[in-house]
Amino acid sequence: MEQGSPMTEPERVAQGHLEAYGARDIEKVMSYFADDVLYYVFPSTLICDGAAAVRERLSNRFRDTHLSARLLRRTVLGNLVVSHEALTLTLPEGPGTLELIAMHEVENGKIKRAWHKLGEPVLDRAP
């Protein structure tokens, strides 16, 4: 995607999803998923089959009041959007960050399949 080019539908879906995720808005986030979405840990471990399972998983995650998300970079090819993101969240050991690659396959304006490749968590330094 060239800088300054208008967003494609798949990119608009991915961006809307990211913004709603960062705001911890479960209803808005869910509006971006197809009812029969498949949600994987990269490369092929299915962790959610269907929107109800995604809602349950994300509802638990959104309880973290420190959770926020930001885009580092993005590539779009056809209906596949690959986003390098950074999450700020509460890890089991304390507050920190986690980088990830989120891949979203978009069909008919909805995320049909999603894959996430998680990086290593980094704990915040004590002041």
Image (spheres, rainbow, N blue to C red):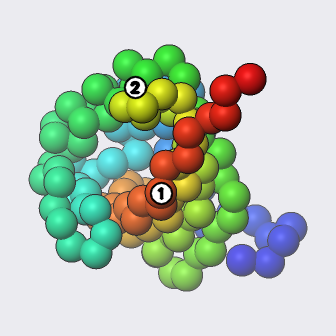
Residue 42 x, y percent position in the rendering: 31, 69
Q: Is residue 52 visible?
A: yes
Q: Residues within 10 Å of mark 2 (few under 14, many from 20)?
A: some
Residue 4 vertical placement versus 52 (above, below): below
Question: 12 or 108, which is in the foreground?
Answer: 12
For residue 62, which numbered disc appears in the image?
2
Residue 82 x, y percent position in the rendering: 53, 70
Q: Residues within 10 Å of mark 1 (few under 14, many from 20)?
A: few
Which quadrant is home to the N terminus?
bottom right
Residue 62 vertical placement versus 45 (above, below): above
Q: Nearer the viewer, mark 2 or mark 1?
A: 1
| Amino acid on which disc 2 is placed | Phe
Residue 14 x, y percent position in the rendering: 53, 55
Residue 100 x, y percent position in the rendering: 50, 58
Determine whether, in the image, residue 27 is placed left or right of residue 18.
left
Determine whether, in the image, residue 99 is placed left or right of residue 116.
right
Question: 127 or 45, which is in the foreground?
Answer: 127
Which quadrant is home to the C terminus?
top right
Q: Residue furthest front?
A: 126
Query: What element does badge 1 sit on?
Result: loop
Q: Is residue 10 visible?
A: no
Residue beneath disc 1: 120
Look at 86% across and 67% down and name the residue there: 4
Q: Quadrant of residue 110?
A: bottom left
Look at 59% across and 63% down and name the residue there: 84
